[in-house]
Amino acid sequence: MTRRFIICDPEKCVGCQICELACSARKEKSFNPQFSRIHAVRLNSLVEPIVNVALTCMLCEDPICVKVCAPKALSIDQDTGLVIVDAGYSGCNECGWCGISCEFGAPTLHPIKRVITICDLCTNDAEPACTLACPKEALSLAAFDDVIELVESELAQKILKDFSHARENSVSLFERVGRIGVTLQSHPRDHSSSR
């Protein structure tokens, strides 16, 4: 079976978050973005003022979320590539390492049930709720080749370049702030003369 993904076209996405509401309504019978398996993200970019995307599980070939799950509550469906949460949730210990380790932040801890939730492409339905609800048709269910085409697009390359540049600058800024903090700590002010 061909692996399919939910992809978001950042040129169409307006950041309305309707995908989150549609997902939570279908999965949890509640309009609450905290219960969603897809997450709308607004990114500041040096090229574009704002870039909106929706992120969900990208069905990695060798998912790090499954590897870091100590209680083995996550597994991979060999036919679809979907990451499956233990149906009884008996294994999940709420550590959250799966979500922290995922580059896309796909596994999330349900705020009430206290178990990991992750996109299953609405497997019991013909089409994922998020793709049906997107008013700008920015979301689609696509095969691997479609994902590659989107990643290789000009806008995607600009975004990746900007994030690489921003990450380098944020590390430099952090290091500079750290040095300033060390300098201030090693030269404390004498406040006794100001009284």
Image (tube, rainbow, N blue to C red):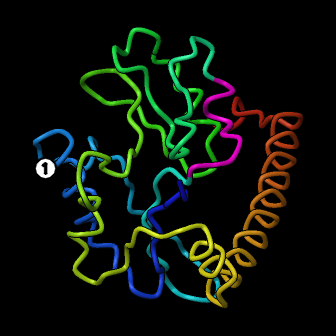
Q: Position of residue 99 (x, y in %)?
A: 54, 36
Magenta segment: 59-68
Residue drawn at x 37%, y 54% is 38
Q: For the residue labelled by badge 1, is the local secondary structure a helix, a strand or a loop? A: loop
Residue drawn at x 77%, y 69% is 164
Residue drawn at x 48%, y 80% is 10
Q: Is residue 80 left or right of residue 191?
A: left
Let me know if residue 24 is in the magenta part: no
Q: Is residue 160 left or right of residue 24?
A: right
Q: Position of residue 171 (x, y in %)?
A: 80, 56
Q: Residue furthest front?
A: 1
Amino acid type indicated by mark 1: Phe
Q: Position of residue 157 (x, y in %)?
A: 71, 82
Let me know if residue 65 is in the magenta part: yes
Number of numbered discs overlaid on the protein picture:
1
Q: Is residue 3 left or right of residue 169?
A: left
Residue under numbered circle 1: 31
Q: Nearer the viewer, residue 115 or 169?
A: 115
Residue 160 figure quarter: bottom right
Residue drawn at x 42%, y 40% is 118
Q: Position of residue 60 (x, y in %)?
A: 64, 48
Q: Nearer the viewer, residue 92 or 143?
A: 143
Indicate the quadrant containing the C terminus: top left, top right, bottom left or bottom right.
top right
CA neighbours of label 1 inside 10 A, class few (<14), some (14 to 19), many (20+)? some
Q: Nearer the viewer, residue 170 or 9?
A: 9
Is 101 above or below relative to 93?
A: below
